[in-house]
Image (spheres, rainbow, N blue to C red):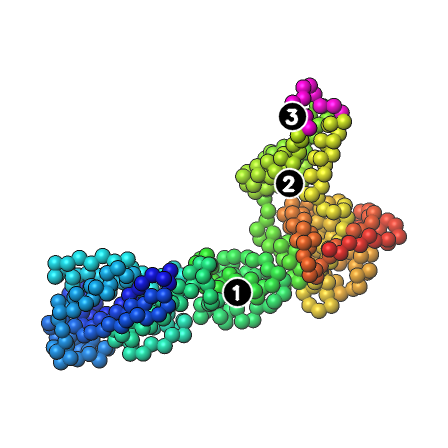
Amino acid sequence: MCSKKYVICDIEATGLDAERDLIEIALITWEEGRILEIYETLINPLRPIPEYISNLTSITNRELREAPKFYDVADAIKIRIEGAIFVSHNTDFDLGLLQKKFQELGQDVKVKKICTLKTAQELIPGLTNYHLDALCNFFGIKIFDRHRAIGDAKATLELFQELLNLRPKNTLKVLFLPQHKKVLKNISTQSGLLYFKDCSGKVIRTEVAINMAQRARELLSVKPENRDLLLRTVSIQEEVTGSVLIAEFKKLSSTPFRPRFMITIEENKCGEKFFKLMPFKKPLKGPWYFKSYFEAKNKLNHLEKNLKSDHFVYREGKKSKEEIMRHNQKVLTLSKNARFPTDHLIIIGEGRRAQEKSLVLIYHHHVVGYGYSEESYEEIFSKPEIYLTERFSQNIGADLAAKRHLTVLKNLKHKKEGWRSLTKMTMTNNKYTDSQEKQHESQQF
């Protein structure tokens, strides 16, 4: 984009009314990152200017009486803006007035245009003001000779360069709105939940984060895709959980997972197992659950593709028992990927503070609950149920979150969490106790 030729324009006028006229113009020709030419001139409007305009711009009526008329400089202006991209802060005002003056001369000027005001509104949502002063203050641009065409044109050029750098896939800076800088200052770097709130204190977004400070900065950085959150966020409340999985569980309490479809394993009259997509209904038949039909159908297609065999494409007759057994084994192998690694396991992770550990207990392929403890690992492994502070009853959302978490743990190079398989356990009076000597099979990803 920088290889194109741009003409950055600013004008000063007799006022803002419909009968306004030009009194000064500045044109900066900019191409490939450098200024090629600067053109500026006063223009005699053929009438006195209001006193407030003279005070604002320091341009006097005497100076304007000695300045050239628009028709004297029209060709010089036209030759510079035609064939270039016209850039100004509020092009409706600047280009609109220029086109009006050319029309009075019986000429028409058509150019491609970029308005830095509108571009800033698109790329930097959430600012309270988009005047040139406000945007220059946001980017740290100093304006010299404010309300003079050349001073404002130079500031507009710097602003335009900053906006070019904010375009998608070309971002050089990470910027935050002034009202969010203080909000972001004291957020913890631990794992937990972020609650983004609007001016009334209502939670407008709940975000699970491994590093809350980093995630908050990502979501409140000035980017077009963050527009809605930038516009609405006034404050952020954080809740440290230590474990990102427990943060997922806590989020489920406010936004529970409600499946609409599931894929089950069925069996036909010949004893051959197959996958079936159907609307969700209890009792749970798993092992896959989905919110959308599209998501469920994609998964079913993937599973069926993995079941296909090239061995008997041209065969006649029914499958043999041996073939059915091999097929069923494939079905069971694929279904194992949707289950927990073992029937009973415990996931140990970081706690909310030093020395504390988080734990998630899974029994019979369902998340039982979670909690925290400062006890030793062996104490926690021996009777994890006594440290649970929150319990679940076949919560599909919690189960899916835990399975996803275990997959992530498996692929991490630097691991702060791990899981251990627990040996045979029995349920007594709604509590879990070891039924034999504690010989734990340990697996750390």
The residue positioned 29% from the left and 75% from the top of the image is: 151
The residue positioned 50% from the left and 57% from the top of the image is: 204
> According to the image, label 1 marks what residue?
217
For numbered disc 3, what is the local secondary structure? loop
Quadrant of the rendered image containing residue 279? top right
Answer whether labels 2 and 1 touch (C-beta < 8 Å): no
Three-letter code for the amino acid on which mark 1 is drawn:
Arg
Relative placement, left or right, of 4 versus 101 is right
Question: For the residues marked 2 and 1, what is the alpha-carbon distance in whole angstroms?
Answer: 34 Å
The nearer-to-camera label among 2 and 3 is: 3
Relative placement, left or right, of 64 versus 92 is left
Residue numbers of the magenta segment: 311-321
Is 55 drawn above or below residue 111 in the view shown? below
Is 193 drawn above or below residue 276 in the view shown? below
Mark 3 Cα within 10 Å, few/some/many (few <14, many 20+)?
A: few
Q: Based on the picture, tell me whether residue 312 belongs to the magenta stretch.
A: yes
Is 168 drawn above or below residue 49 in the view shown? above
The residue positioned 74% from the left and 31% from the top of the image is: 326
The quarter of the picture where the N terminus appears is bottom left
Q: Nearer the viewer, residue 164 or 29?
A: 29
Residue 230, image x and y in percent? 45, 62
* Residue 288 disc label: 2
> According to the image, label 3 marks what residue?
313
Answer whether labels 1 and 3 touch (C-beta < 8 Å): no
Q: Earlier in the sequence, mark 2 or mark 1?
A: 1
Q: Earlier in the sequence, mark 2 or mark 3?
A: 2
The residue positioned 59% from the left and 60% from the top of the image is: 209
The quarter of the picture where the C terminus appears is bottom right
Q: Which residue, as the protein is rendered here, is positioned at the far right?
A: 437
